[in-house]
Amino acid sequence: MQPLVKHLGMIDYQNAWQEMRQFTDVRNAATRDEIWLLQHPPVYTQGLAGKPEHLLHAGNIPIIRTDRGGQITYHGPGQIIAYLLLDMRRWKLNVRGLVRLMEQAVINLLASFDISAQGRAEAPGVYVGDEKIASLGLKIRSGYCYHGLAFNVNMDLAPFSSINPCGFSGLRITQAKNLGIEVSQTRLETLLAQNLIYLLQQQEPEKITRSCKP
């Protein structure tokens, strides 16, 4: 059974995080997987390995230390958040495989608009040239995952200048709007979910190349 996709709109980060943990706490082998698509009001989130020196200027944006992997990043309106609440064993995935799958879903989405993107082994996420367009972070507990990916669509990128995004000084950030993608955020949410589900349903590495067209 493919994951249930939920379009949830704007949700406070703390509330979404709590709901993900609650879902994971009570689920079992029969629970249907879910993909949540949403946005957050402005917030910095600091992963488990996060170092305080990567926050350069706090300003008035709240900072939340969360339980995902990775360093600091920014979430705000105009960014698609895709939270994957999956049974890793059901899909025969390890952490590396899921990271690669999430990256490939974004790469495939961008390819459908004739934009070339790639992942980086040393710095998970998706990049267009030297600019990062999507960030990843996961939490695995008892074989179940939550958190997921953030894909920049049409947002205020200025808050990224107050951090070392994902722990990398000087890392440049881009978004779909800056690349000439002019379809709605709702449409991009749908395409991202379709690509994620497609890649979940076929795990042979040589097949992880197709994309869902706009």
Image (tube, helix red, strand yellow):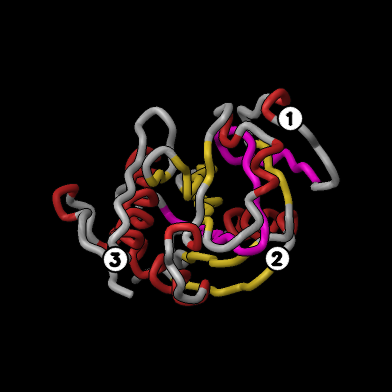
Residue placed most toward the observer, 76 or 196: 76
Magenta-colored stretch includes residue 2: no
Q: Which residue is mark 3?
A: 112
Marks 3 and 1, the one that precedes in the sequence: 1
Q: Badge 3, how many Cα within 10 Å: few under 14, some, many 20+?
A: some
Stretch of the chain drawn in magenta: 62-87
Q: Is residue 26 left or right of residue 205?
A: right
Labelled disc at residue 56: 1
Say what secondary structure mark 3 lies in.
loop
Is residue 118 placed above or below 189 in the rendered structure? above
Residue placed most toward the observer, 106 or 146: 106
Report the residue at 47% width, 72% height from top: 5
Residue 149 placement (x, y as % from top left): 50, 52
Question: What residue type is disc 3 on?
Answer: Ser
Outermost residue on the left side: it is 206
Question: What residue type is disc 1 on?
Answer: Leu
Report the residue at 53% width, 56% height from top: 152
Mark 2 or 1, which is nearer the eye? Answer: 1
Q: Which residue is mark 2?
A: 11
Labelled disc at residue 22: none
Q: Badge 1, how many Cα within 10 Å: few under 14, some, many 20+?
A: few
Report the residue at 66% width, 39% height from top: 161
Marks 2 and 1, the one that precedes in the sequence: 2
